[in-house]
Image: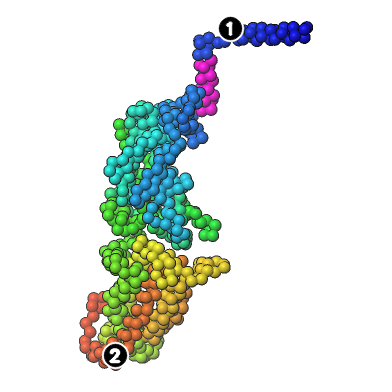
Amino acid sequence: MEEKKLDLNSIIGFVLIFGILGYMLWQNQPTPEELEAQEKAKQEQIAAEQKAKTDNQTLVTTASDYAIGSGVDSLQQIELKNKLGAFAYSAIHATDKETVVETDLLALKFNNKGGYLSEVRLRQFVNYDSVPIYLIKDKNASFNINFGTTDSRILNTKDLPFIPEVTKNGNITVVSMKLKVSESKFLEYRYEIKEGDYMIDFSVRSQGLSTIINSGSQINLDWKLKGYRHAKSISYENRYTDVHYEYEDGKDNYTGARDADKEIDDVTWIGFKQHFFSSVLLTDKAFKKAHITTENLVHDEEIDTVYTKAFAAKMPLELQGGEISESMDWYFGPNDFKVLNAYGKNLDELVPFGWGLFGWINRYIFMPLFSFLGGFMPYGIAIVVMTILVKFLLSFVQYKQFLSQAKMKILKPELDEIREKYKNNKMKAQQETMALQSKAGASPMAGCLPALVQLPVFYALFQFFPSAFDLRQKPFLWAEDLSSYDTIADLPFNIPFYGSHVSLFPILASIAIFFYMRLTTGQNMQSQPQQEGMPDMAKMMKYMMYFSPIMMLFFFNNYASGLSLYYFISNLISIGIILVIKNFILDEDKIHAQIQENKKKPKKQNRFQKKMAEMMEQAEQQKQAQQKRK
């Protein structure tokens, strides 16, 4: 009975103790005024800590400074306000999701942090390994506007949270990415994406930020991209990977395949160009200046296999009435001449057809011809047919070249006699040689001029085939892709300057070049004896006959098989033309008779020949005078 009373008394005691404690806590709780004072003290402490960190300097924000998402409490809002100033509004209301838009040509993703395209995939193309072509993916690119604010901050839009809005109007999708200060004040990236179009209308504008953006600070647009590898040979792809740009109202230029660091004035578009695909930023009004850099990322082809080059462009922006307002465009697509030319913005200069005459020949002759042939026959056959047509048109030039060589061969005995007769008077021998060649209508220069006529065509086609987008991933015979090298064997080791594979088209082209040079240089070696004091041309030609095919074999092993196919067919046809000319058209007896007739006729010298004869005569007289004085 006593134990029960003890237990009951214990319970009553505990209840009384807890009641007293609860009453005391209630009596001592802070008043609303005290709570407000505590909150104010906390804010002052945060501000003091922030001031201690950034005393006498502006605040530079980084990606780690931003809390993006919903459920931001009051303390976090204070911290964001201290870090972002007016743009804390956007951080409070933004989410970390991506915005996805797809058309028939492009698959796009926009990251809400930075408001820029985080992924660009070209839906109709794959790379050498059948992987989709990505121009932007996995943070290989960034687009940033760097600006100062009136509260002494330096902000980077690539790290700031944008609020997306997507609308659709027919076949046009509009993506609006806004970095907000309030619902009516913001910085907006606006994208208009159309079906069937690689060009994206793009604008950057601010509204109501004239009192927030520091008009006295430098505002810079920074665009960076690391180009993904798309081709089988990354070193070959890198030869055609660089920055192209248009400046000064229509001029165009490029940085070249090497590392570059350039300042350009009045730039209207900048293209980060890879071999067959480009990312281009165009502006309606020219950027007054642009600082462009490129860096080669391939130092070892067996290790550096992901990226080709790193590109960067930095352009200052100007405020208009205290606001940013820039109308631009993005092009993400193939370096297809027909596609680029259709835009009419000089973008076809992204296709490296060559400069001057070479570019003109490619643009207005070979490109239309090849497009016509490729429209109704396989592209490999189109190369063969185009080569036949080109060689047929140049056959007259080749005939003139071989005719000149035949004349020199016929004159060789008489030229040898002159050199022997005047072996002690080199000047006189040279005069008599020139006189004989002039009378006979034969000259070494006559053989060189036809070769010079063929050079523009030769170089133009050298530029054309590696740049022809239509050849990309088109097979022919054993070649899987005419825009890349063909492979008949893989080597277990790498040969410097050659590679770790064997291509058959360069081997065939090298053999054809050897026999072609044997036919042509053999004729030259017989017709041009060595002159004293001059290099042994016969020996040099002999070396070239062996060196050129070897150079072809090594140099073209990693080049486009379409180009090697062209050289193989071209030299085969040239061999055939020479054999036909030599055996069925040229008659050496008739040529010899014609030379003798020409020698009987008085030969009128032109002004150049007269001048040369006079100079040589004067030199001869001076030499004789010196000998008499001695």
Q: Determine whether label 1 and label 2 are within 8 Å by CB.
A: no
Q: Residue at the location (32% across, 85% down)?
A: 580
Relative height, residue 177 to residue 103 (above, below): above
Residue occupying the point 46% across, 36% down: 96
Residue drawn at x 29%, y 80% is 400
Q: Left or right of 119: which side holds 579? A: left
**Location of residue 404 (image quadrant):** bottom left
Is residue 547 within the magenta segment?
no
The residue lying toward the viewer, choosing from 103 and 402, is: 103
Quarter occupied by residue 30 = top right
Where 271 falls versus 462 (above or below)? Answer: above
Residue 201, above or below 443: above
Residue 29 at what x, y percent from top left?
Answer: 57, 10
Which residue in the structure is indicated by mark 2?
Answer: 587
Q: Is residue 627 visible?
A: no
Q: Secondary structure at mark 1?
A: helix
Specify the principal SS of the magenta part: helix
Q: In terms of image quadrants, where is residue 208?
A: top left
Residue type at mark 2? Answer: Asp
What residue is pinned by disc 1? 27
Spot the residue most to the right.
2
Q: Residues within 10 Å of mark 2 (few under 14, many from 20)?
A: few
- Visual colour scheme: rainbow
Up-down relation of residue 25 to residue 108 (above or below): above
Reply yes or no: does residue 48 show up in magenta: yes
Residue 603 or residue 340, whichever sits in front: 340
* Count of numbered marks: 2
* Residue sticking out furthest to the front: 1
At horizontal 44% and vertical 78% (from top left) the residue drawn is: 511
The region drawn magenta spans 38-55
